[in-house]
Each structure stands twice: as structure tokens, then as C-alpha cells.
Amino acid sequence: MKKAILAKKIGMTQIFADDGSLIPVTVLSAGPCVVTQVKTKDSDGYSAVQVGFDDKREKLVGKPMKGIFDKAGVSCKRFIKELKFENAEEYKPGQEIKADIFAVGDHIDATAISKGKGFQGAIHRLGQSRGPMAHGSKFHRHQGSNGTSSDPSRVYKGKGMPGHMGSKRITIQNLEVVRVNADENLILVRGAVPGAKKCLVTIKESVKKNK
């Protein structure tokens, strides 16, 4: 991985391309991220860059984390994440990573925690079919039979059941960057990005080649 950045999801809107076509985009406030620590193979056993994003009040930060920020000479940050860059040794503590590392036409992978939907039934959660809705059916939105007959007389592991829906780590691959505003650290991505508004989004260069 050569480039990546942390961002905050602002929301969705639409823009017009040069040919007049309408493009739905997700607006991401990307960075600026600051390098808080550089991991090396000699001291840590692997190579990576630890970055911080979004300022946080100092009194809400514990002493161990505050020591890392003080050593790097940066303000306290709300989000901390390690990025395994191929050229991690070239980064220095305190260095900034801004939105201009990406350009129009780049393809990225966006990772975030999806919206939580609470406890949901099998129809909403798994797309299962409902029963007849007539008064005499007594079976409308129930899941139906879960187990097998006399052999093996149990419910198999992995059977889709009602339960907690959402709040999972989701990655959408190969999204196109359609506009970059370096002055305001904004990246506009074609299509939808997982997560609710103001959630943390990790943007990395795509592992797939655009076909």
C-alpha cells in the first residue's frame, strides 16, 4: 500500500460532470492526519505508520497516549490507526498527510462501521419470505421451521436467525474519486460509502485494478 488516509463521512450529494451527466457522490472530510509514530522492523518487528486524526481535548486523553502525542509534538487526537505503507521509513513523527495524496480518477477502498439497525427479524435481516397474510394463516412474519426431522434433530450451525443487524466492518472496493478539494481537505467519491454521518472512514488505494 502506497497511500491511505483517515476521513470523516459528511454525507451524500450530487454533482454534474463536464458532459452534463449527474453523479451521486459521498463527501469525505479527509485529514489532515498527522504521523504520531513510525513502526520499524528493528524496534517493533514490522513496518507501519501510526497516524492520528481529529483533535480531542487533552483532559480526555490518558497519560500513555498523551505521552505518544507529546513525543511526536502534535495535539491530542481522537482516532489512532496504523497504516502499513510500503515506504513507511520515509515518514517522520509530526508529518501531515493531506487529501491531496489522492487525485481525480484514482480508485480507492473505503472501510467503515455500517449503520446499526438493532434487533431485526429474519425477513428484514436475511430477506426471507413471509407467510400468507390472511386471518386464518397464523403464520405471517415468523421464521418457520429451523431444525431438521428425526435425524439429526437439531439446528445446524450458521442457520440464519433473527438477531442484531448492522454495526459491522464493511469495505466497499474500487470506488472512483471524482473530485478533490485540497484547500478544504474534501474528497468526493462516486457512489455510497458505508457508515453513518460523522463516522470514521479509512480510505486506501484500491487492491483491484479498474476494468
Image (cartoon, grey):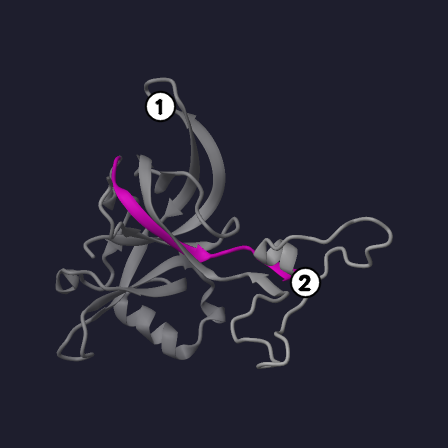
Where residue 36 appears, x then y in whole percent?
28, 66
* 123 w.r.t. 84: above or below: above
Q: Residue at x 41, y 44 (%)?
A: 28
Badge number at residue 143: 2
Q: Amino acid at mark 1?
A: Ala
Answer with the quarter of the image where residue 104 lies.
top left
Nearer the observer, 202 or 148: 148
Is residue 106 highlighted in magenta?
yes
Provide the secondary structure element on which disc 2 rests.
loop
Q: Earlier in the sequence, mark 2 or mark 1?
A: 1
Which residues are the magenta region?
105-121
Q: How many marks?
A: 2
* 31 w.r.t. 179: above or below: below
Whether residue 172 is visible? yes
- Residue furthest to the top in view is 20
- Measure how far apart labels 2 and 1 are at the Cα level: 46 Å
Q: Residue at x 30, y 47 (%)?
A: 108
Q: Amino acid at mark 2?
A: Gln
For label 1, the residue is 17
Nearer the observer, 192 or 161: 161
Q: Residue at x 72, y 61 (%)?
A: 142
Provide the secondary structure element on which disc 1 rests.
loop
Q: What's the magenta bit mostly, secondary-structure-wise?
A: strand
Answer with the quarter of the image where residue 77 lies.
bottom left
**Is 151 placed left or right of 109 in the picture?**
right
Circle 2 or circle 1, nearest the eye: 2
Where residue 45 appears, x then y in whole percent?
18, 79
Badge number at residue 207: none
How many residues crowd around disc 1 within 10 Å: few (fewer than 14), some, or many (20 or more)? few
Whether residue 77 is visible? no
